[in-house]
Amino acid sequence: MKIQFQKPAVYWVQALPVGNGRLGGMVFGGIEKERIALNEDTLWSGYARHWNNPEAQQALPQLRELIAQERYVEADEVTKQMMGPYTQSYLPFGDLLLRMEHGQLGKDYHRQLELSTGIASVSYTIGDVHFAREVFVSHPDGVMVLRLTASEPGQISFRAKLDSQLRHTMSVDGTDLLLHGKAPVHVEPSYRDAAQPVQYDDTAPVLNYGGRLAVHAEGGQVATDTTGITVRDADAVTIYFSAATSFDAQQGKQDETRDPLAITAAKVQQAQQYRYDELKQRHVADHEALYHRVDLKLGDSPADEQMPTDERIAAYGADDPGLVELLFHYGRYLLLGSSRAGTQPANLQGIWNEDTRAPWSSNYTLNINAEMNYWPAEVCNMSELHQPLLQFIGRLAANGRETARVNYGARGWVAHHNADLWAQSAPVGGYGDGDPVWAFWPLGGVWLTQHLWEHYAFSGDQTYLRETAYPLMRDAVLFCLDWLVEDGEGRLVTAPSTSPEHKFLTPQGYAATSAAATMDIALIGELFQQYTEAARVLELDAELVTTVQAAAEHLLPLQIGAQGQLQEWSKDFQEEDPQHRHVSHLVGVYPGRLLTEESTPELFAAARRSLELRGDGGTGWSLGWKIGLWARFRNGDRARALISNLLTLVRPDGPHQHERGGVYPNLFDAHPPFQIDGNFAATAGIAEMLMQSHLGWIELLPALPSRWPTGSFRGLRARGGIELDLIWKDHNPVQLRLHATQSKVCRIRSLVAATLTHREQSEQLIPDADNLLTFNVETGSTYQLDFQA
């Protein structure tokens, strides 16, 4: 499981990502000129501020009247009155640059990222001397570490420096090189043309940031000045880098008492207490403890073991089972590198961003992308990595309560299309500059509650449910109860409502704003179900549960259109783009569980028809979503076709087709440009093809493609806290081992009988009328099922 090349990176999307959730690096692997692009996950523009808009509440009655009169184009214009400011932007820290003194003409070059260890390495030979570098970012020690070695003593000479696109100052602390400054007060989104897109104001309460570069040379000489660190004639060198900002993660705002340079000094000094091999061992042990929880085998790879990854993608794509495995594990690796305890959630680019004006501000896009980032967290046995998002929801809700009150006169809390480090909860759009089709969508908070519930569903942690998830879900329910209005026929609808980023045709032209888009109703319906279930488990709020159940019964039913499709809107409008990248109206199929073949067969079939009409194209993340959807429709070959479309090489120097995704040479998801969500969706989708547990039972191989007849997985996690290891042959399960973390009744869907073995005792299990094998499991116990051929 390696990403590897036989030449250095020229473009950022050819570089190799390393990270510990907070610090990120992209390793280019140059021979004479090495560049490691640097990031720190709290380095954002702006500061906590007021973004709510009282005019929204004043405009709401008029807007609802226009919608009732079906004057949708006019409704769009009024919706603009409800917008707030754009979010702030996630920023690059800068670059660590090395200029080696041996020239650029190396041979036997190799560059790789080993996923299992989280170490990027570079090696080459000049003359008879073999040079090697290793780079990793340690989570235990909070530093990036770069190790340079040579096969002969005294051969390592170079100059190292830090640089940044942001305003900064260089200074020296002993032999350490320091880079420090203040973040911009505002950065315009990349899609806006502005005269002064990057603005600085040192009097504003913006973030202070700082980075520290330290060098330990074995042999040779070291000298430091403000232009860099010079190393001459060393045998081996260890370089340490640490970065920090003055952001207080607990308060969600700037803290002037936090000194980034003091923080980095402490980190570097701690790291320097260990020898390099000790630092490396500490990093690898921490990384492997998470990475090795899951394994996957789908078949033999036709590719040569040393084949460069970009050539492998171009030559084989999804026809290479090993490349599909690599794509699966890469999503796990990227989440491990961009979301750890105490960090910020993975944003639109995880933590890896080289642009001051990143695509779409590299923010938290709540109408799909931020949620998609965390789809693999629970099923792929990385529940701890879910915590940054779950904690961020709490900060977002705290701000969202005031937005709900000011903007809508509503109880509870609300979040919209975009959020940022400061947990902006108001709609974006520059107070009317934006288009409602993407700027106005008040269901972001509702969708995020699915993550609160899913963490409980997988873990069974009632303390977490009671103290963390339930209060946030309850307040989201209160917002929904106040946001819903009657449609004149006794049905509850959302108005205004948009289906994210997709318009419909009216006699007056294309419009975005109407009533009760299907995504709204599906998300609210699912929240009402999950809240009711949570309240039942905790035995709380019986009166509110009754109110919620009554509201759920009066939600406008989802509609089937003239083409047999699940309608995207409450009316059977003609879409602006029949193959639009968003499939928002199918959220109740996946990642939700509102629409299933068992409970809502007609709507489920209509949803499948909708996906057929959308086609198999789209941006990278859209392809990723469709993998999961076809998995839920139990169509493995169609899901694999989407994997094949995703495993299409997008060359960084080639023409980009905005609506045609794939992967870059380093396997980063190409929207294009880069968005990390497609990587995470692909990982979650592959897991969903192999195991599902959303129906109350475990289904094995629900969407196994015909080209994966034999294989195995280890460590996937089902709801109810059950970890699964499965071997299959000739498309059928052969042996299942499961480890229970909760005592419960376990149900496995099977068409054949199986022998259950536990503590050397065996019994025969026969499928019941619903094709379920049912047995009890105890906390901490392991069970084995051998299926009849």
Image (cartoon, grey):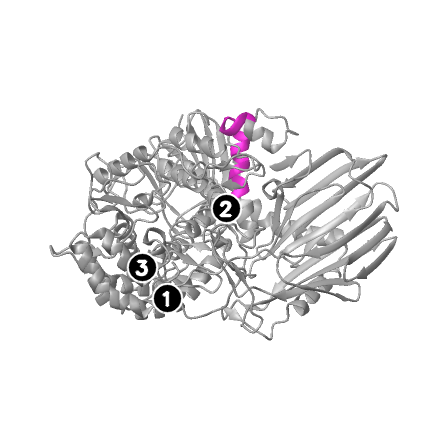
Q: Is residue 153 magenta?
A: no
Q: What residue did someone put label 1 on? A: 400
Q: Please determine whether, in this image, residue 292 is positioned above or below residue 700.
A: below
Give the alpha-carbon distance from disc 3 to disc 2, as whole Å. 30 Å
Residue 676 got which mark? Answer: 2
Q: Earlier in the sequence, mark 1 or mark 2?
A: 1
Residue 658 in percent (x, y) is at: 45, 39
Q: Is residue 325 magenta?
A: yes
Q: Please determine whether, in this image, residue 565 is positioned above or below residue 257.
A: above
**Is residue 534 or residue 351 the one in the foreground?**
351
Give the alpha-carbon distance from disc 1 to disc 3, as whole Å. 19 Å
Q: Which residues are magenta?
A: 315-331
Task: State whether the magenta stretch is mostly helix, strand or loop.
Answer: helix
Which residue appears farthest toward the left when viewing the image? 489
Residue 80 got which mark? Answer: 3
Q: Earlier in the sequence, mark 3 or mark 2?
A: 3
| Amino acid type assigned to the residue bearing label 3 in the image | Lys
